[in-house]
Amino acid sequence: NLVGKGGHAEVYKGKLSNGQVVAVKRLMNDDKEFADRAGDFLTELGIIAHINHPNATRLVGFGIDKGLFFVLQLAQHGSLSSLLFGSECLEWKIRYKVAIEVA
């Protein structure tokens, strides 16, 4: 259930045993810069773990089984980036509301 892929990681949609739908971000380890990217990935994990905002997904867990990964609540409407820059154009009123709520 791949839902996104960047230069260094893949994001999958999953479901926990309690029924919660989650996003699993997994660091790809198929290149020679894995050690540097692992450091960046762990830094991102540390930042996400400290974010407590009603408009941000929460960290559910993390692990190292078969590579580095962390588990987040699934953002039902996708990422902020995909909302703002995706193919579907958002009205400025909605963009303004998003900007105010993020601040």
Image: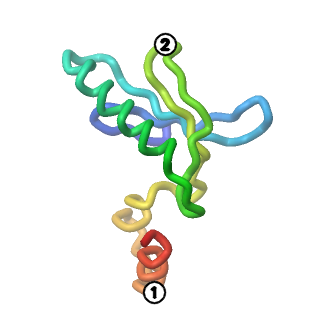
**Going by the picture, which residue comes out furthest to the left?**
32
Q: Is residue 102 left or right of residue 32?
A: right
Look at the numbered discs 2 and 1 and tell me whether their residues touch, using CB distance below 8 Å: no
Question: Considering only vertical position in the picture, is 78 above or below 31?
Answer: below
Question: Considering only vertical position in the picture, is 82 above or below 40?
Answer: below
Q: Quadrant of residue 102?
A: bottom left
Q: Residue at x 38, y 59 (%)?
A: 81
Q: Is residue 1 visible?
A: no
Quadrant for the N terminus in the image: top right
Kind of element beneath mark 2: loop
Q: Is residue 19 visible?
A: yes
Q: Is residue 59 left or right of residue 100?
A: right
Give the number of the disc on residue 93: 1
Q: Residues within 10 Å of mark 2 (few under 14, many from 20)?
A: few
Q: Residue at x 49, y 17 (%)?
A: 64
Residue under label 2: 66
Q: Nearer the viewer, residue 103 or 75?
A: 103
Q: Nearer the viewer, residue 40 or 94?
A: 40
- Horizontal and vertical percent position of residue 47: 42, 44
Quadrant for the C terminus in the image: bottom left
Kind of element beneath mark 1: helix
- Horizontal and vertical percent position of residue 73: 61, 46
Q: Residue at x 59, y 32 (%)?
A: 61
